[in-house]
Amino acid sequence: MEDKIYDLGAGFWSIRGSFIKNGILDIGVQCALVKLSSGRFIFLDSYTLTDGVRAQVMALTNDGQDVEAVLNVHPFHTVHCEQMAKDFPQAIFYGSSRHPKQVPNVKWSDDLVESDTVAERYPELEFSLPKGIHYIAPDESVHASSLLVFHSASLSIYVDDTFEIPPSKLINTMQADLGLHPTTLKALKDELDAGKEYCDWATQLAHKWRDVRNFCGAHSGLVKFEEGRFEAALLSAIDRARPELEA
């Protein structure tokens, strides 16, 4: 899969890259570049930038000097963190509590990426952490949770794994249907109302971020929704999953 960068407007760029799973299938991966009101930049997630995409990013960011931070929003997406730290050595690296254990050579901030401290630092973005499921699941094959990000100026949602669009639904991208990550059931906390808590969180998110037009998914690619379709698609996904998750 060829690396590409998409300008979604209002200071938000979606960067699509390659990730080979099990040495066979390229399921894709992503990061995003966000311009702050200060004129400086942050990344959402880490990715090894190459060739034309790297040149465009460096041109935008004063050869990388204007990148002030990298927010690694998925605890299990750690492959590119070390290279990203080499490319942007002046940037502050935020991650989950799992990141320093997996990538000890990076100098991580003491402030966790999902903390209120980080959210308050970047008012250009809205953040939401799923409720009812483990952010860092005890079973390391369960990757359902991630810190979701909404950039209201460009109407873009950035989400790793938590919600996804099945490949069969990508043909008609204007009517794309959302689904939940296949490990969501396994990610539920061992609490009586965990399933209900998750479904209620996602329902509230659908209403709160109803204006989403650009869906940036780690493995779903970049998908554009018609006005109102994101809210409807997410509510439909929750309605389908709720009986099993609440059982």
Image (cartoon, rainbow, N blue to C red):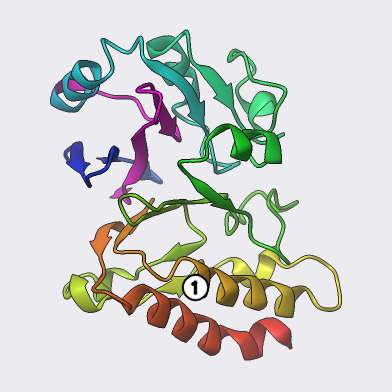
Q: Nearer the viewer, residue 27 or 112?
A: 112
Residue 90: where, in percent of width, then height? 47, 8
Q: How many marks?
A: 1
155 to 119, vertically: above or below? below
Q: Nearer the viewer, residue 86 or 5?
A: 5
The quadrant holding residue 189 is bottom right
Q: Which residue is mark 1?
A: 206
Residue 221: where, in percent of width, then height? 28, 55
Q: Which residues are magenta?
A: 23-51
Residue 6: where, in percent of width, then height? 19, 43
The quadrant holding residue 93 is top right
Q: Residue at x 41, y 46 (%)?
A: 22
Residue 100: where, in percent of width, then height? 67, 24
Amino acid at circle 1? Ala
Q: Residue at x 49, y 18 (%)?
A: 82
Q: Nearer the viewer, residue 85 or 185?
A: 85
Q: Is residue 95 in view from this perspective?
A: yes
Relative to 217, is 223 on the left or the right? left
